[in-house]
Image (cartoon, rainbow, N blue to C red):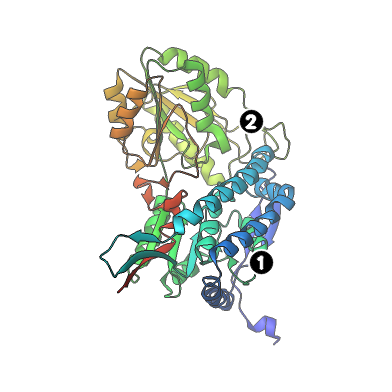
């Protein structure tokens, strides 16, 4: 028996193009020996990297990011062919990823600088922000470049090494990150893993892992948190689901609000944790809002995501389509009105679902309660601000919420009362890297982005000298 025959390797990944439904490629899985080697290499790399001065770490990370600029078109095509995002949006994701990385780099010197504490004469008191060691980043597929960069760049700058376990839908993006950071002065600082859930659970439990960052479903977050809590005292960052509400107040700019709320619900085929998942519209604007939203939602062009004219591609998986079908059918059964969409487009190959507008949706409908994660906008009428606020908070999720109003005082009142990590006025479905990205309730724990994004990736060390 040959050596290659004697080593049993786990089954690899078979990637299916969500538009053509044809085989895209196959990616080999890592064996247990592969994972052990990558973990040990990351551990040794972290020890060397932490000794590199911050300014040099920043310079090296900046040079490594040039890989994404130089290979932007191929990386964008890989994103599109793996998960269906229109090529125009995939190119934009490459650009946004680079801008977000630059923002985190700019924040790093201040965020990682020691905190000086006034003390008694003869004493030196300060707080150092020291690296943790090896960070395991479990990344999602819906924004396969933006989600990992939220962890990888600040983790590296802070002095850590990263093991990147990307989604089974988008492993080529994991390979892109590994290639980009392959030529730093310390090797093995970013390694891509292709492993299944049981192997991931074993890795989480390994004492050589110093932090876990997970982006994905609430169910997945619970399993990750449970795996850590059962045996480890490390911290876990969880970016989970959302059922993000929008409220269009009586004084809103109607067309602007309707156009942006529709975009917030349908961008990326609705596959965004901070996309608009439910809308409440003041009774005075309700009918006019629906008319404008109907006009806007009909403008989407479904088709080949590699065609620049396409504005909505397929969903990333067949199961996502099935979830939307279930939610829409439930809403209609409960008395909602279907104004647009509500079905798979006839005669079109791929995992498509028409952009869908629902009116008069009752509060107990699945589409108002559970994460839909697809191109559907359910709308309900409200009599006043108080009713809108109560309905917006009536959710087990709390990622973002948007208030569409010309009145800053109203927006501030909602911001104070809303149970959400981010509250927008006249905006939605957007991350500003200078602000922490965080959720409450079942939307997760911890923060990425902003200067606070460095906090979970470092630990505080007290220096007390006499």
Q: Secondary structure at mark 2?
A: loop
Please state if 362 lies on the left or on the right of 340 as rendered. Answer: left
Judge left or right: residue 17 versus residue 252. Answer: right
- State the image quarter where residue 3 is shown: bottom right
In this orientation, does residue 71 appear? Answer: no
Cα gap from disc 2 to disc 1, whole angstroms: 46 Å
Q: Quadrant of the C terminus?
A: bottom left
For the question of whether residue 210 can be seen, the reply is yes
Q: Image quadrant for the N terminus? A: bottom right
How many residues crowd around disc 2 within 10 Å: few (fewer than 14), some, or many (20 or more)?
A: few
The number of discs equals 2
| Between 76 and 421, the one nearer to me in the picture | 421
Question: Label 1 belongs to which residue?
Answer: 182
Against 162, is 390 above or below? Answer: above
The extreme bottom residue here reads 1
Which x, y percent locates residue 178? 63, 63
Q: Residue at x 60, y 45 (%)?
A: 99
- In which quarter of the view is residue 413 placed? top left
Q: Is residue 38 above or below residue 420?
A: below
Instruction: Say which of 197 and 383 sits in front.
Output: 383
Q: Nearer the viewer, residue 137 or 436?
A: 436
- 28 lies above or below 144: below
Q: Residues within 10 Å of mark 1 (few under 14, many from 20)?
A: some
Q: Which-is-in-front pick, marks 2 and 1?
A: 1
* Secondary structure category for the residue under label 1: loop
Q: Horizontal and vertical percent for residue 347?
A: 67, 32
Give the residue at x 71% y 86%: 2
Q: Position of residue 276 (x, y in %)?
A: 46, 33
Q: Which residue is mark 2?
A: 346
């Amino acid at each position: 028996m040959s050596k290659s025959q004697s080593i049993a390797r786990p089954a690899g990944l078979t990637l299916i193009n969500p538009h053509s439904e044809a085989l895209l490629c196959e990616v080999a899985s890592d064996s247990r020996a592969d994972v052990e080697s990558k973990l040990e290499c990351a551990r040794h790399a972290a020890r060397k990297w932490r000794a590199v001065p911050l300014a040099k770490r920043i310079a090296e990370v900046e040079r490594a990011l040039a890989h994404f600029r130089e290979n932007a078109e191929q990386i964008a095509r890989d994103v599109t062919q793996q998960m269906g995002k229109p090529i125009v949006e995939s190119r934009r994701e490459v650009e946004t990823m680079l801008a977000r990385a630059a923002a985190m780099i700019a924040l790093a010197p201040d965020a990682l600088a020691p905190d000086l504490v006034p003390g008694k004469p003869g004493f030196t008191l300060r707080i150092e922000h020291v690296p943790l060691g090896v960070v395991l980043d479990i990344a999602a597929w819906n924004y396969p470049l933006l989600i990992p960069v939220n962890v990888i760049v600040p983790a590296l700058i802070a002095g850590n090494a990263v093991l990147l376990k990307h989604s089974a839908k988008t492993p080529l993006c994991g390979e892109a990150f590994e290639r980009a950071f392959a030529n730093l002065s310390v090797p093995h600082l970013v390694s891509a893993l292709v492993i299944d859930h049981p192997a991931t659970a074993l890795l989480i439990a390994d004492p050589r892992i110093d932090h876990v960052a997970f982006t994905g479903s609430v169910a997945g977050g619970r399993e990750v948190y449970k795996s850590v809590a059962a045996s480890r005292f490390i911290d876990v960052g969880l970016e989970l689901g959302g059922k993000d509400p929008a409220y269009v107040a009586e004084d809103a700019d109607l067309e602007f609000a309707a156009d942006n709320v529709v975009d917030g619900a349908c961008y990326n085929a609705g596959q965004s944790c901070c996309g608009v998942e439910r809308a409440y519209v003041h009774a005075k604007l309700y009918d006019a809002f629906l008319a404008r939203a109907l006009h806007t939602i009909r403008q989407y062009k479904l088709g080949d995501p590699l065609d620049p004219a396409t504005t909505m591609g397929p969903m990333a998986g067949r199961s996502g389509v099935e979830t939307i079908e279930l939610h829409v059918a439930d809403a209609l059964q409960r008395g909602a009105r279907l104004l647009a969409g509500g079905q798979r487009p006839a005669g079109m190959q791929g995992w498509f679902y028409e952009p869908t507008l629902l009116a008069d949706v009752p509060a107990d409908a699945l589409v108002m309660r559970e994460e839909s994660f697809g191109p559907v906008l359910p709308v309900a009428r409200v009599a006043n601000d108080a009713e809108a606020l109560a309905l917006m908070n009536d959710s087990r999720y709390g990622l973002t919420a948007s208030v569409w109003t010309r009145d800053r005082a109203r927006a501030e009142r909602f911001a104070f009362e809303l149970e959400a990590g981010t509250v927008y006025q006249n905006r939605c479905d957007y991350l500003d890297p200078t602000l922490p990205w965080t959720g409450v309730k079942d939307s997760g724990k911890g923060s990425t982005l902003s200067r606070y994004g460095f906090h979970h990736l470092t630990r505080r060390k007290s220096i007390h000298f006499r």
